């Protein structure tokens, strides 16, 4: 009997180890399957987040392009609104049958006032140097040099005013400058 137990003892032990190993392997496989499922779920979550982020970026880019296109298309809208009353005033002046010199002068002054308001609204500023100001090639264009009783390379007279839009030169002032003595 003891011999039978001895003979069956190790076999039973091996079977138990095998079952335990198989059970352990089963647990390990189940654990791996759970980890794989969790990893796949996480990957799907990241892919979904990536696709949503990509769609958001595309929508943002499209809206930005539309805004830029609208800005280019309607950039002059504010300035045009300010100029419309000037045109209205000029058309009204032309409808007057027998204008007097005084009424024409008054109308021109009112129209100039409206035009100046439109320029201010559009940030269109005059470049009108005074006699004696130093020539600034960034804002002035010298047409000629003339003899004068002032320092060389200073403005003697302004032939035509210049203009800037928001500190950017639109047209330089045409000036004559003093020549060296």
Image (cartoon, helix red, strand yellow):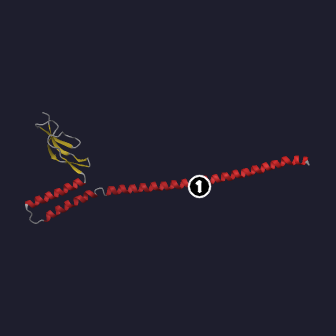
Quadrant in which the C terminus appears: top left
Question: How far from the left and from the top, in percent, is residue 126?
Answer: 20, 49
The residue lying toward the viewer, choosing from 4 and 141, is 4
Question: How far from the left and from the top, in percent, is residue 53?
Answer: 48, 54
Q: Is residue 54 left or right of residue 18?
A: left
* Residue drawn at 20 percent across, 61 percent down: 85
The residue at the far front in this view is: 2
* Residue drawn at 18 percent across, 48 percent down: 161
Question: How far from the left and from the top, in percent, is residue 145?
Answer: 14, 39
The residue at the far right in this view is: 1
Under circle 1, the secondary element is: helix
Question: How far from the left and from the top, in percent, is residue 15?
Answer: 81, 50
- Picture layout, residue 132 above or below residue 118: above
* Residue drawn at 62 percent across, 54 percent down: 37
**Res 77 quadrant in image:** bottom left
The 10 Å Cα crowd at callout 1, few under 14, some 14 to 19, many 20 or more, is few
* Residue drawn at 15 percent across, 46 percent down: 159
Q: Is residue 104 left or right of residue 173?
A: left
The residue at the far top in this view is: 181
**Res 176 quadrant in image:** top left
The residue lying toward the viewer, choosing from 70 and 10, is 10
Q: How many marks?
A: 1
- Residue wearing tag 1: 41
């Amino acid at each position: 009997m003891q011999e039978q137990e001895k003979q069956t003892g190790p076999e039973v032990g091996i079977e138990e180890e095998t079952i335990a190993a198989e059970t352990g392997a089963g647990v390990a496989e189940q654990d791996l399957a759970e980890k794989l499922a969790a990893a796949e779920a996480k990957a799907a979550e990241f892919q979904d987040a990536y696709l949503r982020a990509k769609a958001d970026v595309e929508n943002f880019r499209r809206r930005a392009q539309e805004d830029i296109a609208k800005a280019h298309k309607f950039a002059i809208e504010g300035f045009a609104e300010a100029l419309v009353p000037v045109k209205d005033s000029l058309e009204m002046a032309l409808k007057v049958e027998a204008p007097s010199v005084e009424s024409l002068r008054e109308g021109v002054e009112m129209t100039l006032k409206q035009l100046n308001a439109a320029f201010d609204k559009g940030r269109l500023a005059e470049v009108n140097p005074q006699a004696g100001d130093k020539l600034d090639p960034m804002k002035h264009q010298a047409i000629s040099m003339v003899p004068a009783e002032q320092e060389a390379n200073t403005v003697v007279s302004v032939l035509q005013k210049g203009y800037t839009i928001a500190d950017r030169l639109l047209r330089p002032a045409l000036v004559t400058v003093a020549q060296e003595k």
